[in-house]
């Protein structure tokens, strides 16, 4: 669980409430704004990333191909019959210019989405996030289950790799026996993983996790409270959303 | 393992595991909880496109969860749940992308399909037929994955109880 106590970048200034607010606010603005008003979520997401997670800009390389492709396709294929429904129709009578602007609009939404999600992922502390989900879902062992799933991944990879190699050494994964090989790989890996999880769950029960937890009454964790930065983010996001909708109206 | 997992095979494996897990832990919400854990693990794998796969994982888990909660943990519910989850993997981009990127993306898709069918000399009506065939293919694979997962879970119960 120690690995879950840190965020991806070790950011200390923003908590789980702030990260969720940024994500929800940016996505809400990106979905609901159109045309020139899309600059608001773009600026909002860029400022948040500049302040709290500059590495989020690196993730824009995911859409390096998507953005020009969407702009090119929409510029070439956007037809005159769609101009009237375009947000830019009043300004641009040409289908190519209207198509280009529609492509830009879609691309801006993609950029905002990538920035918001990257900022969330890079700033959120997974321990806080899992505790929050635990308290919301009233599950008493979500954090433990998530930590277990995270830490068991290398083991699962190893047993599946070993099984794969064993089947290959016995002549598996050839066209004539592909189906049976996949069946052996899946069943063997899943059974091994289940057996391992069963062992771990017994060990966890013995240490008062899971169903034994309520009877054992372990010490309560510290409640996660929003920090001052979280509150500032919350208020700023609310103001930005309110102003955006007011100016759009 | 250097195996390119995506689309139909990836969702089929997910259905297989979800149905197996639900059969072994027949509690309401266990499949959706499984989906939340996997979605959070997906967040940890930084560097890829995150939001869309996360929503897809959660939706597929929700569909299996709802089916197996309403229909009970049995073979028929596994079949229907698997079918719905697999079909969602195909429908997902067409539902999520207009929500995230605006309705214009639908027109861009529509225009791309029409231009593509014109270029290949295919009647646009056939394109719709092709899409329906793909949906049916997804459904059949999902149903098979659901049934296989259910049958495997019965075997797993026997093996684990030894």
Image: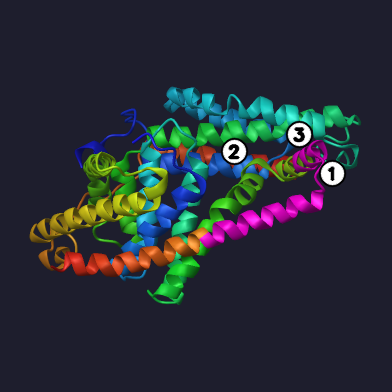
Which of the two residues, B75 or A166, is positioned nearer the viewer here? Answer: A166
Furthest residue toward front:
A176
Identify the mark nearer the N-term, 3 or 2. Answer: 3
State the CA–CA distance, disc 1 to disc 2.
27 Å
Q: Is residue A14 magenta?
A: no
Which of the two residues, B146 or A220, is positioned nearer the viewer here? Answer: B146
State the CA–CA distance, disc 3 to disc 1.
11 Å
Of circles 1 and 2, which is in front? 1
Find disc 1 in the rendering and name its residue: A85
Vertical arrangement, residue B61 with respect to residue B4, above or below: below
Q: Residues within 10 Å of mark 3 (few under 14, many from 20)?
A: many
Principal secondary structure, stretch drawn in magenta = helix
Looking at the image, residue B122 sits to the left or right of residue A215; the answer is right
User: Where does the N terminus of chain A fall, quadrant-wise?
Assistant: top left
User: Where does the C terminus of chain A fall, quadrant-wise?
Assistant: top right
| Quarter of the figure with residue B114 | top right
Q: Is residue B129 magenta?
A: yes
Find disc 3 in the rendering and name its residue: A102
| Quarter of the figure with residue A137 | bottom left
Vertical arrangement, residue B2 with respect to residue A27, above or below: above
Find disc 2 in the rendering and name its residue: A240
Vertical arrangement, residue B77 with respect to residue A213, above or below: below
Please provide the residue range marked out in magenta. Answer: B112-140
Identify the mark nearer the N-term, 3 or 1. Answer: 1
Residue A214 image label? none
Disc 2 on helix, strand or loop? helix
Q: Are marks 3 and 2 in contact (CB under 8 Å)?
A: no
| Quarter of the figure with residue A91 | top right
Tell me if I can see residue A104 in this picture.
no
Q: Are marks 1 and 2 in contact (CB under 8 Å)?
A: no
């Amino acid at each position: 669980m120690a690995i879950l106590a840190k965020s991806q970048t070790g950011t200390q200034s923003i908590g789980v409430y702030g990260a969720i607010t940024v994500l929800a606010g940016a996505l809400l603005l990106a979905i609901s704004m159109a045309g020139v008003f899309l600059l608001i979520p773009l600026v909002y997401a860029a400022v948040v990333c500049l302040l709290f997670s500059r590495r989020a800009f690196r993730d824009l390389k995911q859409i390096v191909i998507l953005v020009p492709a969407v702009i090119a396709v929409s510029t070439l294929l956007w037809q005159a019959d769609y101009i009237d429904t375009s947000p830019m129709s009043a300004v641009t009578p040409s289908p190519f210019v209207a198509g280009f602007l529609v492509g830009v609009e879609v691309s801006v939404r993609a950029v905002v989405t990538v920035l918001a999600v990257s900022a969330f992922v890079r700033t959120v502390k997974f321990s806080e996030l899992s505790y929050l989900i635990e308290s919301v879902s009233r599950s008493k062992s979500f954090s433990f289950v998530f930590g277990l799933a995270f830490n068991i991944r290398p083991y699962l990879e190893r047993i599946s790799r070993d099984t794969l190699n064993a089947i290959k050494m016995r002549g598996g994964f050839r066209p004539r026996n592909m189906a049976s090989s996949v069946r052996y790989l899946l069943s063997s890996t899943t059974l091994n993983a289940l057996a391992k999880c069963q062992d771990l769950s017994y060990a966890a029960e013995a240490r008062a996790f899971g169903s034994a937890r309520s009877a054992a009454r372990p010490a309560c964790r510290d409640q996660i409270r929003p920090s001052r930065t979280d509150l500032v983010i919350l208020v700023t996001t609310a103001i930005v959303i309110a102003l955006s909708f007011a100016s759009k109206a | 393992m250097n195996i390119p997992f995506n689309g139909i095979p990836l969702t089929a494996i997910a259905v297989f595991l979800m149905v197996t897990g639900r059969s072994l832990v027949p509690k309401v919400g266990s499949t959706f909880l499984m989906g939340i854990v996997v979605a959070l693990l997906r967040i940890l794998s930084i560097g890829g496109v995150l939001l869309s796969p996360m929503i897809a994982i959660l939706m597929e888990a929700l569909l299996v969860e709802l089916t197996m909660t309403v229909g009970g943990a049995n073979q028929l519910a596994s079949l229907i749940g698997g079918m719905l989850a697999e079909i969602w993997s195909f429908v997902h981009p067409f539902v999520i992308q207009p929500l995230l990127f605006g309705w214009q993306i639908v027109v861009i898709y529509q225009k791309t399909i029409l231009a593509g069918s014109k270029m290949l000399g295919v009647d646009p009506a056939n394109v719709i037929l092709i899409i329906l065939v793909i949906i049916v293919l997804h459904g059949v694979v999902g149903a098979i994955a659901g049934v296989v997962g259910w049958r495997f879970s019965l075997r797993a119960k026997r093996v684990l109880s030894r």
